[in-house]
Amino acid sequence: MSKVSDKLFKVFVYGTLKRGEPNHHWLTRQENGFARFVAQGTTDEKYPLVVGTRYNIPFLLDKPGTGHNIHGEIYEVDEKMFANLDVLEDYPKYYDREIQKITTMSKESVTCWLYLIRSFPAKLLEKPYLTAYHNSEKHPYRESYLDSEKDDMYRDEEAPSEPK
């Protein structure tokens, strides 16, 4: 995959964009831009990572010091890929992003962008805190979340009914 520009950004992914997860294809499609796996890592800061809404979306909540150090993956991306990730994450309306320190498995400190939710209902803090997200049969990620809205965080979490 060739780079669109020489400017590269490091992005920490902790949810559906990781390898083996439902949205990883966003990072591998050439038409989205350039992405290269750098390393596995963990946030230096603790955060609550929860699964919420009827779509079972992983949310990293902006409540530093609460929860766990979050395990994920670091990618180097070009401007085009970064812009496409912003589309996927509905930045800045749904997710926001900020720069955080991530420590790799080899103990290297890397400065990365990560996406998080700044405004959320308090009830999300009552959910179990994860150290790492993995799509599961118990709480399957629903691709139709692209139809979701930020207000879904405030609604009951019934799964959408199947078409008849």
Image (cartoon, rainbow, N blue to C red):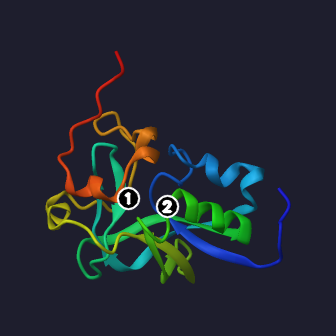
Front: mark 2 or 1: 2
Q: Which mark is residue 132?
A: 1
Q: Give neighbour class at mark 2: few <14, some 14-19, many 20+ (Cα, 10 Å).
A: some
Looking at the picture, how far across and down is residue 153, in whole percent?
Answer: 26, 56
Q: Secondary structure at mark 2?
A: loop
Residue 140, given in percent of the width and then of the height, sits at 36, 37
The residue lying at 17 percent from left, 46 percent from top is 156
In the image, what residue occupies the spot 52% across and 71% down? 105
Q: Amino acid at mark 1?
A: Ala
Q: Residue 94 or 35: which is nearer the viewer? A: 94
Tell which residue pokes out farthest to the top in this image. 164
Q: Residue at x 27, y 49 (%)?
A: 53
User: Does residue 139 appear left or right of residue 154 in this picture?
Assistant: right
- The percent position of residue 157, horizontal first and vertical second, equals 21, 44
Badge 1 marks a residue whose secondary structure is loop
Q: Is residue 118 visible from the viewing direction of this image?
A: yes
Numbered marks: total = 2
Decide: few, some or many residues near mark 1? Use Cα within 10 Å; few <14, some 14-19, many ≥20.
Answer: some
Between the residue at mark 2 and the residue at mark 1, the CA separation in whole angstroms equals: 18 Å
Report the side of 95 relative to 162 (left or right). right
| First in sequence: mark 2 vs mark 1 | 2
Quadrant assignment for the C terminus: top left
| Quadrant where the image shows the N terminus | bottom right
Nearer to us in this view, 146 or 57: 146
Badge 2 is on which residue?
A: 89
Q: For residue 157, which numbered disc appears in the image?
A: none
In percent of width and height, residue 14 lies at 45, 61
Q: Quadrant of residue 11?
A: bottom right
